[in-house]
């Protein structure tokens, strides 16, 4: 996809490049109803579509199809763009194009749910709605399973099978600026930037120690050995191990 020169009959190597000022002037003309400038503006933004469909490479999808869908998103973005909001067109258009492509991929997903599974899911939904009216509250999965006389696990599996998948890149909020995606609201408490920098700093600090100090800290903090076990292994006293360990840690603290 990345090396494709012609896509949907368009020679990507010959696509025009416009400066921000030129794009802004063209937008004014487009909003004034100039159809010729509109076509040229769309053509001038096809590189934006091309850059976005690169993110979807490796899915086995035809790049021509993705490009056409992306162009639909581009046109929708142009039709709905309001210059009064004071944001760049590309900032507004990117989530629109991505959303259009993701809807296409979702609707053409190769994963198919069996008819029997769908039927069970709809029976469960119907039973849940009826129980909700009777109990005046949200029924539990066990109550739904008993109502339709199937196993609890089958009800859970059936209901999960008809849920639309959510992409990490799906926008959940957009206030006339960069959108906030699902991925932005998911926090990894373990693999954070701070933890990565900390590990890198520790690694660099370890390199500044002598080979003996590195060996002692490795056995103590990475292999979980006691000071006595370390002393026996390298044939020194436990007091010496304690002193070398303390000195090494103090140096590393200062370095970090």
Image (tube, rainbow, N blue to C red):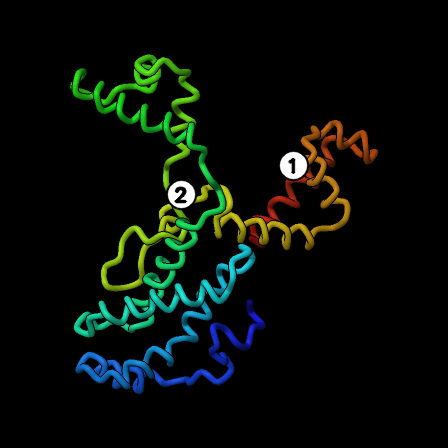
Instruction: Establish if 190 lies above or below 89.
Output: above
- N-terminal-most mark, 2 or 1: 2
Residue 208, image x, y percentages? 68, 55
Task: List the single residue furthest toward the front.
Answer: 115
Q: Residues within 10 Å of mark 1 (few under 14, many from 20)?
A: few
Q: Nearer the viewer, residue 163 or 138?
A: 163
Q: Residues within 10 Å of mark 2 (few under 14, many from 20)?
A: few
Instruction: Establish if 60 lies above or below 29.
Output: above
Residue 165, disc? 2
- Does residue 197 appear to the left or right of 98 in the view shown? right
| Marks 2,1: beta carbons within 8 A | no
Q: Which residue is mark 1?
A: 221
- Does residue 199 appear to the left or right of 171 in the view shown? right
Q: Nearer the viewer, residue 57 or 234?
A: 57
Q: Residue placed at 25% from the left, 86% from the top?
A: 25
Which of labels 2 and 1 is toward the front?
2
Q: Quadrant of residue 90?
A: bottom left
Q: Residue placed at 29% from the left, 73% from the top?
A: 88
Q: How many marks overall?
A: 2
Instruction: Establish if 188 lies above or below 104.
Output: above
Separation of disc 2 and disc 1 at Cα? 42 Å
| Label 2: which secondary element | loop
Instruction: Establish if 65 lies above or below 215.
Output: below
Q: Nearer the viewer, residue 6 or 102?
A: 6
Residue 18, image x, y percentages? 37, 85
| Label 1: which secondary element | helix
Q: Residue placed at 30% from the left, 50% from the top?
A: 172
Residue 118, image x, y percentages? 38, 31
Q: Quadrant of residue 1?
A: bottom right
Residue 96, image x, y percentages? 32, 62
């Amino acid at each position: 996809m990345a090396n494709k020169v012609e896509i949907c009959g368009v020679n990507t190597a010959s696509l025009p490049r416009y400066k921000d000022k030129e794009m802004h002037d063209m937008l004014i003309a487009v909003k004034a109803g100039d159809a010729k400038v509109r076509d040229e503006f769309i053509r001038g933004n096809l590189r934006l579509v091309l850059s976005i469909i690169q993110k979807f490479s490796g899915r086995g999808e035809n790049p021509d199809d993705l490009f056409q869908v992306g162009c639909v998103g581009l046109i929708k973005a142009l039709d709905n763009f309001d210059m009064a909001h004071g944001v760049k067109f590309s900032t507004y258009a990117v989530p629109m194009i991505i959303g259009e492509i993701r809807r296409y991929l979702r609707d053409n997903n190769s994963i198919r749910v069996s008819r029997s599974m769908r039927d069970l899911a709809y029976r469960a939904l119907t039973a849940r709605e009826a129980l909700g009216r009777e109990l005046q509250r949200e029924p539990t999965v066990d109550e739904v399973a008993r109502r339709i006389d199937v196993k609890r696990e089958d009800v859970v599996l059936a209901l999960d099978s008809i849920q639309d998948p959510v992409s990490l890149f799906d926008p959940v909020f957009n206030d006339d600026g960069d959108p906030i995606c699902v991925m932005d609201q998911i926090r990894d408490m373990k693999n954070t930037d701070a933890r990565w920098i900390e590990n890198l700093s520790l690694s660099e600090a370890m390199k500044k120690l002598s080979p003996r100090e590195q060996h002692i800290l490795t056995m103590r903090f990475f292999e979980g050995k006691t000071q006595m076990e370390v002393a026996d292994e390298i044939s020194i006293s436990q007091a010496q191990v304690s002193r070398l360990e303390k000195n090494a840690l103090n140096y590393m603290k200062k370095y970090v």
